[in-house]
Amino acid sequence: MTIKKNLLIIAIFIFVVLTLFINKLTTPRVLSTNELLINGLFLFENPKKISNFSFFKENGDEFTKYDLLGKWTLMYFGFTKCPDECPTTMYQMSKLVKVLREKEFPLDDKQWILVTIDPERDTPSDINKYAKGFDEAFLGVSNVRPMLLSLASQLSVNNVMPSGNNMDYTHLDNHVDNIILLNPDGDFAGVFRPPFDISRLSLTYQSVTQN
């Protein structure tokens, strides 16, 4: 009886050790601020508060700061007629989501938003269809330029805007290509900077947003 009891204890001990070992291997490592920076993510020491905003979804519903609460948000500013940067970055974001799904990384509290910087030509329907062309989980939104200016300036992407009233659209060709990270409090938490490499993007994203 004693031998069986000892064997049972040993078996339980081995099981616990193996479980902890496997968990350590599968749990993303928490990177230091410097490691995050080296891998392309500039994380603010103190996340920045942003004011409320209102953009429109394809169905006419609003997307506001309230929709950021409780979720980690990746937000990208682009447009449907973008020739180079937008499709490249959106593709990298779609690869990130694919990797996270394959790893069964928790995504219930994650979202991916594309804000058009060309609201004069991109309707909510246009930008949403463009976003979902990369992944069905992506959401595209649009609103008039004053609202766009307000949010973009708060998220350090204000130089995508034209000066004066010149709307020849050439200003869109050199827009800022950062991916914005917003935390579950709806605050501006950091910036993923190009060039985007899926291994680095996945590493830093998981480190910061893991539960």
Image: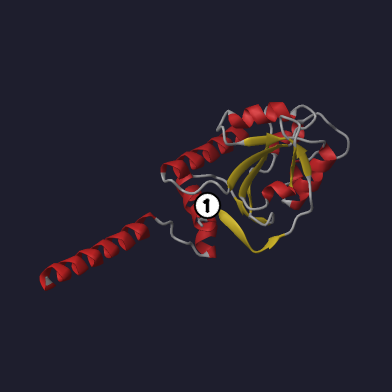
Q: Position of residue 191 (x, y in %)?
A: 62, 52
Q: How many marks?
A: 1
Is residue 88 depicted above or below 111 in this figure?
above
Q: Position of residue 22 (x, y in %)?
A: 32, 57
Task: Answer left or right for 6 relative to 55.
Answer: left
- In the image, what residue occupies the spot 56% across and 31% down? 134
Task: Answer left or right for 79 relative to 101.
Answer: right
Query: Is residue 84 visible to the viewer in this orientation of the structure?
Result: no
Quadrant assignment for the N terminus: bottom left
Q: Position of residue 141 (x, y in %)?
A: 71, 36
Q: Element type at marker 1? A: helix
> Image quadrant of residue 80?
top right
Q: Dot 1, crowdedness within 10 Å: few (<14), some or many (≥20)?
A: many
Residue furthest to the right in view is 165
Residue furthest to the bottom in view is 2
- In the image, what residue occupies the spot 52% across and 52% down? 205
- In the image, what residue occupies the spot 60% across and 59% down? 43
- In the image, what residue occupies the spot 67% across and 52% down? 69
Say which amino acid is labelled 1: Tyr
Depth order, front residue of 155/84: 155
Task: Answer left or right for 15 relative to 183.
Answer: left
